[in-house]
Image: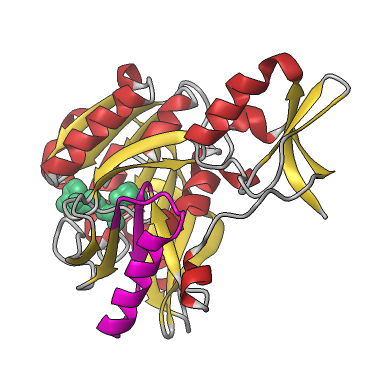
Amino acid sequence: MTVPCVAVARERGEAVRARLAEADVLDGDHQIVVDDGTIYLPVTDPAGLPDRLADRVVERDVAARDRQRTPADVLGFEPSLERLGDIVIVDEDDPSRARAIADAVMASDLSCTTVLDRASPIEGAHRVREWDVLAGEDTETVHREYGHAFALDVARVYFSPRLATERHRVTTQVSAGECVVDMFAGVGPYAIPMADRGADVVACDVNEVAVAYLRENAARNGVEDRVTTVVGDVRATTDAYADTADRLVMNLPHSADDFLETAVSLASDECVLHYYDIQHDADPFGPGRRAIQEAAGSTYDVSVETERVVRSYAPHEENVCLDVRLTRR
Ligand code: SAM
């Protein structure tokens, strides 16, 4: 059976192996192979590779290694688990089943310090949830996504690893020299990759803990010179950036329409707006389209470039994104 491998010159093997291990994408179930001066490093998730290594992925027949013990080996069934750095998240309504899964995670060879179960919906202005701590105690971790590292405390800030693909779709549209305003930046999963592509980013959040992590993450990823942080309600704290934004990110899907007046005031003469929304599946894009048109008024022409369902949010409710170009008349 073939598996995806990063193929590099043998001399670079150890350096690349260390980078893949750090990014948590090295496939420990398959053997590393050297063939004619090239080393083949099996990887678990080609989508999670830093850009420069993503170009070097080939399919290759490599032998399996002795497998490590998984939670499924312990339980006898495959549990639904989510990884956030070295935290494992279970999503179980039944406390005894959650307990059994947590015990199996800790008994397995999975590298994990803490097991959490969701104890409340995401709530409040900071969009944070309560957690049941099933094993370990530390809710702070460092999560890696598409080659960037994000420190965060899942009990004090918003972060969803499920949005990785969507964030990558948006961040790869950014060109060097753009001015971006990320109106609801969290710990920086849009702002930091955008700055890494050469944009100057103003990143705002009302949660001061999230902004503290954002600053730490900008330094951690070497982009602190291109990220300006703002703490507070974006409607009251970003006047200094009026008319500057070539791109706006609005990832506050339940209430983004309350912030469209501010978004329009931040836009430069030509601005792309990434507008996230949660709506009924009968018309998931219409309310956003109409709200943006109304906020733009006669100041901007509005052209909707992409309408995309990001994920199903609840029965008959979709989390969507509209990519919209505003062009000053
Ligand atoms: N963009 C980040 C991400 O993808 O992880 C965070 C998105 S989270 C859904 C929304 C963020 O908006 C939260 O971090 C919350 O604290 C922040 N927020 C809520 N109301 C705000 C406001 N009025 N002004 C600025 N930030 C706000």
Q: Who is closer to the viewer here, 177 or 103?
A: 103
Rendering quarter of residue 202: top left
Instruction: Determine the residue positioned at 34% across, 82% down.
Output: 97
Q: Quadrant of the C terminus?
A: top left
Q: Is residue 67 shown to the viewer in this render? A: yes
Q: Looking at the picture, tell me which residue is in the foreground, 47 or 285.
A: 47
Q: Nearer the viewer, residue 161 or 116?
A: 116
Residue 298 appears in view? no
Residue lying farthest to the right in this orientation: 36
Residue at 71 percent of width and 14 percent of height: 11
Q: Which of the pair 74/184 is nearer the observer?
A: 74
Q: Position of residue 153 (x, y in %)?
A: 22, 47
The image shows residue 172 at horizontal and vertical percentages of: 55, 38
Residue 196 placement, left or right of 237: right
Number of marks in the rendered image = 0
Examine the structure image and report whether residue 113 is included in the region drawn in magenta.
Answer: yes
In this picture the colour scheme is secondary structure
* Image location of residue 261, percent across then percent down: 24, 51
Whether the magenta-drawn stretch holds residue 94 is answered as yes
Q: How far across and how far down the image is residue 59, in percent?
A: 81, 44
Vertical arrangement, residue 156 with respect to residue 222, above or below: below
Residue lying at 25% horizontally and 64% vertically, measured from the top left = 255
Which span is picked out in magenta?
A: 85-114
> In screen coordinates, is 49 left or right of 232?
right
Occupied quadrant, residue 220: top left
Q: Residue at x 17, y 34 (%)?
A: 212
Vertically, is 251 above or below 254?
above
Q: Is residue 64 left or right of residue 168?
A: right
> Which quadrant: the N terminus?
bottom right
